[in-house]
Image: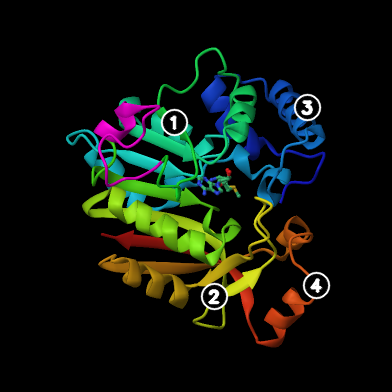
Amino acid sequence: MAMASTISDQELQFISQWTKESDVAKLRTHVLEHWKRMQESSDHLYGCMKSRNYLEPRINKFPAYQRLLKRIATENLKFLEIGCAFGTDVRQVLLDGWPAENILAIDIVDTYWQFGLDLFLDKTHPPPIQTLWADIIDDAVFDPTKVPSTPTNPVIGEQFLNGRIDGAFAGAVLHVLSAETVRALLQKVFAALAPGATFFGISLGITGTDDSFPWGVTPDGKGDKRVLHSSGSLKNLAREVGFADCITLEVPRPASLDTQEGSIWQDGELELMESKGITRVFVGFEMRK
Ligand SMILES: C[S@@+](CC[C@H](N)C(=O)[O-])C[C@H]1O[C@@H](n2cnc3c(N)ncnc32)[C@H](O)[C@@H]1O
């Protein structure tokens, strides 16, 4: 995890590539000032945002993404990101040559996207992709079975939904949601995907059990518990929703992330989890329709 006042050259590589600014010292100052402004804002910041995980894309590490990239030169593939936040990953997708008109990024709020425009210095020429600021589980704004489904932006309904998406990605999204919302999100993504298409991503999860574990509360003020899925519980859920298969990969989670999550756990939850021999890992997943 990045320390509050230090940002490595490696962490600045992507923003340098995107902005074409090679003066690393200048970028470091810009990133730090931007980060401080965000801390001072009244907007909710997730733990991974406080530790500046948004500086580096992670989508390029997924085999499912690499397989899709090999096809974009010859096929008109549609890409959906759920919970795009600052837009770091969709900017990587654009740099990788995916046509902008075939990319749809969704987030429940546009707050982080706006922070992203400031961060990536492209407010005057934002990434020319389709965006939708809506709760993906809300049928009124996102019903992937109806065309057109988004009255505010019929292009999205006509071009992207109703089984047209070839690849959907969600990075660090499932673990901020409740169990019911994760199920609803998977159902929405399933309906939006073309037959044979994949939904892939990574979330904080658990190992040492095949069950899921409730933790903290969602930041929407409803008081619902968030859920941490294990490989087993995520695979079961994917199957129940209708996915043909789901593979998962457990990735060790550095202990340094404890401070990032510190305030999310509620009284006794962490101790209960540990008393059952359950530990936290990252769970990468790839679900095929
Ligand atoms: C922890 S952040 C992860 C952001 C980014 N994908 C990353 O990897 O750094 C979770 C994101 O999911 C978004 N989100 C939460 N609930 C959502 C929902 N129901 N529909 C769409 N986006 C949602 C949040 O606004 C936030 O941007």
**Left or right: where 237 falls relative to 288:** right
Residue carrying label 2: 212
How far apart marks 2 and 3 lie (CA) works out to: 38 Å
Residue carrying label 1: 131
The residue carrying pointer 3 sits among few (fewer than 14), some (14 to 19) or many (20 or more) residues within 10 Å by Cα, namely: few
Q: N-terminal of the two: label 3 or label 1?
A: 3
Q: N-terminal of the two: label 2 or label 3?
A: 3
Q: What is the magenta segment's predominant secondary structure?
A: loop
> Disc 1, ligand 1: is the CB inside 8 Å?
no
Front disc: 3 or 1:
1
User: Which residue is depicted at the point 74% across and 55% down?
Assistant: 260
How far apart marks 3 and 1 lie (CA) works out to: 26 Å
| Contact check, label 4 and label 3, Cβ < 8 Å | no
**Residue type highlighted by circle 3:** Glu
| Contact check, label 3 and label 1, Cβ < 8 Å | no
Secondary element at tag 1:
strand
Which stretch did the figure color magenta? 142-158
Q: Position of residue 78 (x, y in %)?
A: 28, 38
> Disc 3, ligand 1: is the CB inside 8 Å?
no
User: Which residue is depicted at the point 75% across and 33% down?
Assistant: 38
**Residue type highlighted by circle 2:** Ser
**Residue type highlighted by circle 1:** Thr
Where is residue 50, by image quadrant?
top right
Front disc: 2 or 3:
2
Residue carrying label 3: 33
**Residue type highlighted by circle 4:** Asp
Residue carrying label 4: 267
The residue carrying pointer 4 sits among few (fewer than 14), some (14 to 19) or many (20 or more) residues within 10 Å by Cα, namely: few
